[in-house]
Amino acid sequence: MAVDHPPVSDWATDFDHTDAQWVENPFPIWDELRARCPVAHSDRYGGTWLPVRHDDVAAIAYDTEHFTSRSVVVSEVRPGPDDPPAPIGLAPPITSDPPFHAMARRLLLPAFSAKRIATYEPFTRELCAELLDAVAGKTEFDAAGDYAQHIPLRVIVRMLGFPQEDAEMFRRFIRMVLEDVDATAEERLAVQEEGEVDAYMDARIAEHLAEPQDDLTSFLLDAELDGNKLDPDHVRGTMVLLMIAGIDTTWSAIGASLWHLGQHPEDRQRLAREPALIETAVEEFLRAYAPVTMARLVGRDFEFQGCPMKEGDWLLLPFPAANRDPEVFPDADKVVLDRAENRHAAFGLGIHRCLGSHLARMELRVALEEWMKRYPDFELAHSEEVTWSAGQVRGPRSVPVRILGAD
């Protein structure tokens, strides 16, 4: 049973990122707060802060002295000062603080280099073609449910060297972590204590120890920090990070891009006419529909922009709001496919900037390329059926489309 959260009464003093109004369309909320209260506060979830201006989001993202990354998902479960234990955190390196963070991040860089990610492009392209083949002949289907959601899920499973048929278990776990944040503390802890994911990871680790493969799991098992193999919790935590950070986020970005193109024939037709525009268009979709809002905990009492933040308070870092700040981006509320200067924050800011940005860009680009080759002419159907995810990763969970010009 979820915690009963009443509708928000005042976004400046009572915001909730799971509120139905926020889930459906947060952009007017952020616009209002920038003008009225650029650092909002809510007593929900035990006390949470929300900056919405680009400069404030950036300042906090770069400040590792006053803000800790020990927990990056706001929920009813508030960790104590030693929970999870330092320095690894639950899902390193995203839950790690300096100086351990730099070491944990550095060891992963080779696995996520542009050169290494390029080796997964053929699989991704074949997967997209397979998914599009599955809906061939249909004039209407769900671009999110039938296409977008499967791409990053199966690519991550492939990278880890896990069986493709196990992908559904990943999806259930991701929903619990990222979307069911309004579940009670007891419910969330009960799911964690069931240990399904840990048991699954341990079984795959044992398999890879017995028979190493050319995949990310064996890479992690072979990696060293200060001359020592990684702690088993570190290996498992990094695998969990890939599930959480590498699947729902890119699924959301692909779905939002198709949602946009389904409603804007001028952009869809231009992209069909000018396929070379895809790289720039990908960056603009990432800016305009950035899926990820990260979180921090206040590490110690600290006043920020006149706000008396207390140790242990939650703080949301809405990178999507930063990307819509008109002080930084001209025509911030418009999608400009050929936007020349686009230093967006879709992949975060500061030391925790997304390690998998090459992967996400590749998946989004290939997904759009393959879609546009197959279906250059389509539109959003049944707009009232579009649904969006709640929580810190925002993306469409249902995007019904109609293929135009089909026989």
Image (spheres, grey):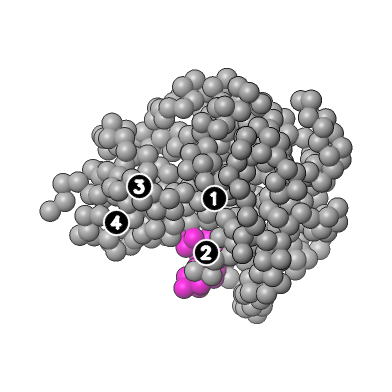
What residue is pinned by disc 4? 141
Badge 2 or badge 1: first in the primary sequence = 2
Badge 4 or badge 1: first in the primary sequence = 4
What is the crowding at mark 2: few (fewer than 14 residues within 10 Å), some, or many (at least 20)? some
Mark carried by residue 384? 3
Badge 2 or badge 4: first in the primary sequence = 4
In percent of the image, x 38 and y 49: which residue is there?
386
Q: Are marks 4 and 1 in contact (CB under 8 Å)?
A: no
Q: State which mark lies toward you, 4 or 3.
A: 3
What residue is pinned by disc 2? 171
Query: Residue 61 in the image: x percent, y percent?
Result: 71, 36
Q: Are marks 2 and 3 in contact (CB under 8 Å)?
A: no
Q: In the image, which residues are magenta? A: 153-167
Q: State which mark lies toward you, 4 or 1.
A: 1
Mark 2 to mark 4 CA distance (whole Å): 20 Å
Q: Amino acid at mark 3?
A: Glu
Q: Nearer the viewer, residue 60 or 222?
A: 60
Mark carried by residue 390? 1
Q: Amino acid at mark 4?
A: Phe
Q: State which mark lies toward you, 2 or 1.
A: 1
Badge 4 or badge 3: first in the primary sequence = 4
Mark 2 to mark 3 CA distance (whole Å): 25 Å
Query: Residue 97 in the image: x percent, y percent?
Result: 79, 47
Query: Residue 328 in the image: x percent, y percent?
Result: 57, 22
Among the 4 quarters of the image, the one containing residue 136: bottom left
